Image: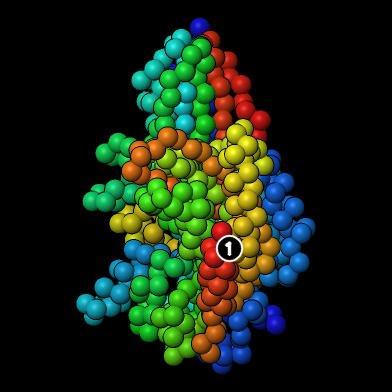
Amino acid sequence: MKDIAQVVEDTAAKLLKIAATILPSEVKEALITGEKETEGSLGKSQLIAINENVGLAEKFSKPMCQDTGLVSFFVKIGDKFPIRSEVKTALIKATKRATEDVPLRPNAVDMFEGNTKNNVGIRGFVPWFYFDLVEGEDCEIIALPKGGGSSNVGKMKMIPPGKGIKGVKEFVVEALAAAGPLACPPYAVGVGVGGGEDMCMNLAKKALLRPLFEYHEDSKISEIEKELLTTLNKLEIGAMGLGEGPSVLDVHMEFAARHPASLPVGVVISCWALRHAGATIDEEGNVEWHPH
Amino acid sequence: MEYHLNTPIPPEELKKIKIGDIVYITGTVVTARDEAHLKALELHKEGKQPPVDFQGIGLFHCGPVMKKNEQGEWIVVAAGPTTSARMEIFQDEFIKTFRPGLIIGKGGMGERTTKACKEETCIYGYFTGGAALLAADKIKKVKDVFWFEEFGMPESLWVFEVEEFGPLTVTIDAHGGNLTEESIRKIEANRDKIIQGL
């Protein structure tokens, strides 16, 4: 019988390494397409550098960007998975281990005590966990390390419900225009609509985990995603904000019910390095790595 | 145009360069982010000097991933630029006080920095954001590190010896030009047009 907590820790440490060093295949493809389709030399040279850098990271198993992000995990625990709260402990241990082994940049800074040097906050909360309880025997773990530069341009607004979906679109356009050249475009955009002021941001972040070019199953939503993709590229931010090449690689949206008086909209923006990696562990400790 | 600069960079060299030009730098480049800018300026106010002379060298907005090799020496793992806009609040004062020749970052800087670059003859260049391994490859030696214990890895002053570090796209020149500001004006005009059409 395998030590399940150890399997969770080993798996999570490896997921952090995969996320930091290898881009998901659809992101790589989108960036290569972007390079081919960019005509201006300023923008093209940026995408050439990005793609060369992505290749080096994978080849030498090194972090593609020096900002290896603030760590978060999306976890689904099945009813019959042998451990529960121990999963948290294992993920914290994995974060410390990956900081040494990959290495990841120590990015957890305490307001009063300074950098914790291991990516784990001394007051809890970091790494951040999104837990879900599901049926079955498995535990699914997705690691999402997110860079500070692109988190700094995230935005939330409670818009008047009377503005409706047009108001949602308007806010997304404003958020991306404000991000402009700041956060390493071309961007991937996650939009969360509804819920409360916190939930819309969670949904927006979760939307980033859906593979690029995989649109929402509800066609009412997927139509808006595609419309926003076209619209946002008309901002002409361009690669690295130099006005040439793609501004946005894709837009994903998630919707929740809202309070009648509220229309919360969250926009979470990822730099070109949209890093995440996942695996599913069964009750016996067998690991299935998600396609990457 | 393409320029290959050596530190300390003479002001007359910097004056030749215009926005949109490509430059490569060889010599000394020092990393400094938010905390290091603040501390250097505070020391100066107290009449003390920071441990590095910034005059004519490259100032790199970067928080690298570093590790120690078996001999206990620091080596660079990944070292791309961080978002420079955060330094806008004190970059002008830093330029006036310490006179760096070239600032390396990404995402561009604003009016205050542009003005200081013009007055003090300094330029600002983009290294491709996130291209941390390409950048690390141009760093030949880690000469020193300061303020590591106090600030931790990302915020320390790392003193690098670099060779042909680039390509850097110049977006602020020493004549008041700012390529990013031009981009932002275009993005804002596009935004207004898009919103009107929704």
Is B93 or A140 nearer to us in this picture?
Answer: A140
Whether A49 is drawn above or below A78: the answer is: below
Q: Residue at x 51, y 38 (%)?
A: A254
Q: Residue at x 35, y 72 (%)?
A: B89
Compared across the picture, whether A197 is left or right of B159 comes to left
Tell me which corner region of the image, top left, top right, bottom left or bottom right, holds residue B138: bottom right
User: How far from the left and from the top, in percent, is residue B52?
Assistant: 39, 73
What residue type is disc 1 on? Gly
Compared across the picture, whether A120 is left or right of B14 comes to left
User: How far from the left and from the top, in percent, is residue A125?
Assistant: 33, 37
User: How far from the left and from the top, in percent, is residue A6?
Assistant: 46, 20
Question: Which image quarter is the N terminus of chain B in?
Answer: bottom right
Instruction: Report the colour scheme.
Output: rainbow
Question: Residue lying furthest bottom in this view?
Answer: B12
Tell me which corner region of the image, top left, top right, bottom left or bottom right, holds residue B36: bottom left
Whether A179 is drawn above or below A71: the answer is: below
Query: Mark 1: few, some, or many residues within 10 Å (few <14, many ≥20)?
Result: few
**Number of numbered markers:** 1
> In this figure, which residue is indicated by the disc labeled 1?
B197
